[in-house]
Amino acid sequence: LKEMAVTLGQAKALLDIESKAGQATHIVGSIAPFEISEFLPLLANAAKTPLKVSGKADARVDLTLPHQSVEPSGSVSLNLENWILDGLTLMELGGFSVPEDEKKKTPNVAPDLDVTGQLQLRGKINANLERGTFRDGTMRLTFDASHLGVRYQELFQKKAGQPLIIDVAGDGSGKSVLIRGLKIQGPAGLKLLAKGNILDLKDYVTKLQIVDGKLPLATVASFLPKAGDTSGIVLLNGELQGSLKGLKDWNGIFAKLNADLKNVTLQHESFVVKRVNGKIETIMSSSGDATKGEGEQTLLVRLLGVSGQWWPAPLIGEDAVPLQIEAQGSINYKNRVLTGNVSSTLSELNVTPFLNCDFLKVY
């Protein structure tokens, strides 16, 4: 059959089908752009709340069906064009429970979490199948969260209208994914570049390397409702290993971050620090549920030539003279015991060292 037209709702396929008695069937063709929302009723039974997704998709197929079998082998290519997902749908897809009384109010989907606005998705997915199962493939997706608003308690708030775009490029094989590039771009030059692997798609066991990060702190503070006057830039690199499911309770996580501070200012009700420069290395690992005090948690922080100006609470004011500080050393936390050796110089007070703790124990 040449150029056989098949219509399912708005989806129209033009296929070449070759089949001989007792032999495999070969199907090659394309599916013209169709509106994805038309197929949402197929997922309605699995969803707890109505899914709201719009956007178009088109596809190409090159499949072979063995004789007397519906387990295809071959390739499928899918283009996603300007998909739009609303906040409630994202919560449903993310596995968050949505109380019955919250279904009537749109943005509130959980007691501590509000999601409003829309997420836009576009990209391309190529998948190769072997007897009905995924063998390998590639993906290139862009998530545009610029029109999405997210608030978690009083700890985090991303307002709708703040630009935030995530680009992901990867190769999949069996149960693993090679992340060739993960790029996050935000307002005022905020960026994060990473690469790595998802080694197990069931538990999302991940090994991610942060290649390049730039965090303008004024931008970061705009996501933190309780942050005070903050400025400067932090340059980041490092790595993250473990199951993403363990992030919730810091179980089975290893993280290493190297931060290069550039002219940083932080203001708190009890102190102000300005013109802070230097490097901080942080290494953290956890086994067991940290939220319940189970297992072993370690945290190592190294200060490498950190310098800046400090105003403690009694000295904050227009006429106050800042205290020049320089600090170096390390702090180590393991199993609820804190040890460390940190030296700091306050030049105005001519005290050296200001703090030298050979051993601190905290319960």
Image: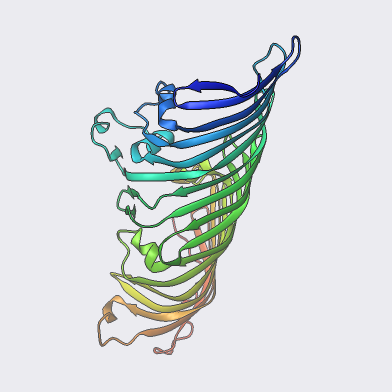
Against 254, is 318 above or below? below
Q: Is residue 336 left or right of residue 147?
A: right
At a point 48% along the width and 78% down the height, the residue shown is 277
Q: Picture coordinates of residue 155 (x, y %)?
A: 34, 54
Q: Picture coordinates of residue 79 (x, y %)?
A: 54, 39
Count of numbered badges drawn on the protein: 0
The colouring scheme, among rainbow, by chain, secondary structure or one colour, is rainbow
User: Which part of the image, by quadrant, shows the C terminus?
Assistant: bottom left
Q: Is residue 301 left or right of residue 173?
A: left
At a point 48% along the width and 54% down the height, the residue shown is 336
Q: Nearer the viewer, residue 9 or 152?
A: 9
Picture quadrant of residue 222? bottom left
Against 9, is 341 above or below? below
Residue 330 seen by the camera: no
Q: Nearer the viewer, residue 267 or 8?
A: 8
Q: Nearer the viewer, residue 357 or 141?
A: 141
User: Which part of the image, by quadrant, shows the N terminus?
Assistant: top right
At a point 28% along the width and 39% down the height, the residue shown is 108
Spot the residue most to the front.
2
Picture quadrant of residue 86? top left
Residue 83 seen by the camera: yes
Picture quadrant of residue 204? top right
Q: Picture coordinates of residue 38 (x, y %)?
A: 41, 27
At a point 55% along the width and 26% down the height, the residue shown is 13
Q: Picture coordinates of residue 136 (x, y %)?
A: 67, 36
Q: Nearer the viewer, residue 102 or 40?
A: 40
